[in-house]
Amino acid sequence: MSRRSQGKRSWDVRASALARNTHNLIRSIVENLQVEPNPEKRFIALSVGDPTTFGNLNPPEQVIQAVRESVEWHTSRGYGSMVGHQEARQAVAEYSVHQGPVTADDVVLCSGCSHALELAITVLADPGQNILVPRPGFMIYKTVAEGLGIEIKYYDLLPNEQWKVDIEDLESQVDDDTAAIVVINPSNPCGSVYNTEHLMEILDVATRNCVPIIADEIYEHFVFSGHKFTAMSSLSKDVPILTCGGLTKRFLVPGWRMGWLIIHDRRNILGKEIRKGISNLASKILGPSTLIQRALPAILQSTPQSFFDDVVLFIENQAKLAFEEIRRVPGLRPIMPQGAMYMMIQIKMSLFPDFKNELEFVERMVSEQSVFCLPGECFCYPNYMRIVLTVPEDILREACQRIALFCQDHIVTRDKIKEIEEEVTLSNEACRMINM
Ligand SMILES: *Cc1c(COP(=O)(O)O)cnc(C)c1O
């Protein structure tokens, strides 16, 4: 008889600690909401950050054609290198010259930008260390980090200053265990676009404290007229920057899962160890889809500038439309974005005594008006909601009108409204001044 241990007498299969401690904040909040739409009104989801949802925004023919061709090649079927095919990395390097000097060796192809972010976070941080992320901000970093015991710490963005980083707060959050600072520019959910001067202020904090930056630039070039996108890495003289990007948003193909990590390390601070570490971590998935990798050079080289211009112009017009509609709604204060594809709207909760918090507010807006906006809680930022601007114009217009109706139905009293209107006019005045 073998002397192996007795084993278990009954089934007891548990999810690992990693699985139990990994959460997608948006998903867990949305799943817990009572979102039963009003059957009399067509449901409008202003919540989904996927530009393909309504079918009105599509990639250009050149991009579709590139994948058509790729599918025919026998070389698009096998495994690639763990960090991606050389030709595809070379194409990303050429596409990314605005980020500073980049060679194919600095590029790692990933399964979407989220995967790039995961590589960046996990190559830099050990359990017990922390990374700093913006609040409000997209929360994928938390999803990646927390299960591994990497702490998330927040630094504040300033809603009355076009969501600039509160530099003092950022600096005060840095400690000996800070492994990286995440900067999202242009921002999800805020739509802010930082100018060179502000990016330099952020870089200064990183320089002084010797902390690398993870630049989430999935919305690079996604900026409205009068604003300019500057890559964080193009300004850095010393701070190592891991820039995360991809096809997802700009090419309108989130489901294709093609992203990349670009290593900017002008002073060779990260050295070989970090590069090796990234390629070790990339080997966990044996590299992203080679079908898209093979199509990547054609996708990046043949998409006409007019395609990008048209998409951004459409979104900018949607932003203007939504801003004009919402600013007139008592109790709400929209903040005009400068890029990306979202708008944040402040809900003056004290004027809506029917609701305890913005979660209840958005919940009831679904059951009464069939319009669903993402509660600020999803971005660790209560008393706000986020709308997406990629929906077709007539739907966006209707949604705004229903939001206005909903607010009329629930705002405190008549007399109070007068007071509020004055306040709204004042704050719009302030917005206009900031925009100038
Ligand atoms: C959409 C988004 C991502 C994820 O992009 P994928 O390529 O779909 O993984 C990452 N960061 C931000 C800020 C986003 O909005």
Image: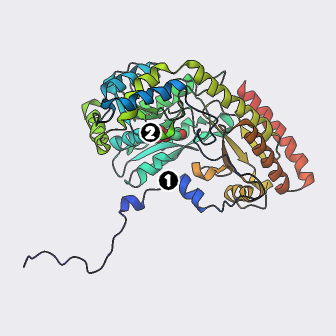
Locate residue 400 relative to residue 232 in the image: left or right. Answer: right
Mark found first going from the N terminus, 1 or 2? 1
Q: Residues within 10 Å of mark 1 (few under 14, many from 20)?
A: some
> On residue 24, which mark appears?
1
Amino acid found under the numbered disc labelled 1: Asn
> On residue 319, which mark appears?
none
Location of residue 88 in the rendering, given as x and y in whole percent from the top left corner: 36, 26
Location of residue 70 in the rendering, given as x and y in whole percent from the top left corner: 39, 29
Asked if ligand 1 lies within 8 A of label 2, the reply is yes
Location of residue 252 in the rendering, given as x and y in whole percent from the top left corner: 54, 34
Asked if ligand 1 lies within 8 A of label 1, the reply is no
Residue bearing the label numbered 2: 257
- Number of marks in picture: 2
Residue 243's quadrant in the figure? Answer: top left
Residue drawn at x 53%, y 54% is: 25
Locate residue 376 relative to residue 81 in the image: left or right. Answer: right
Q: Farthest left residue?
A: 1
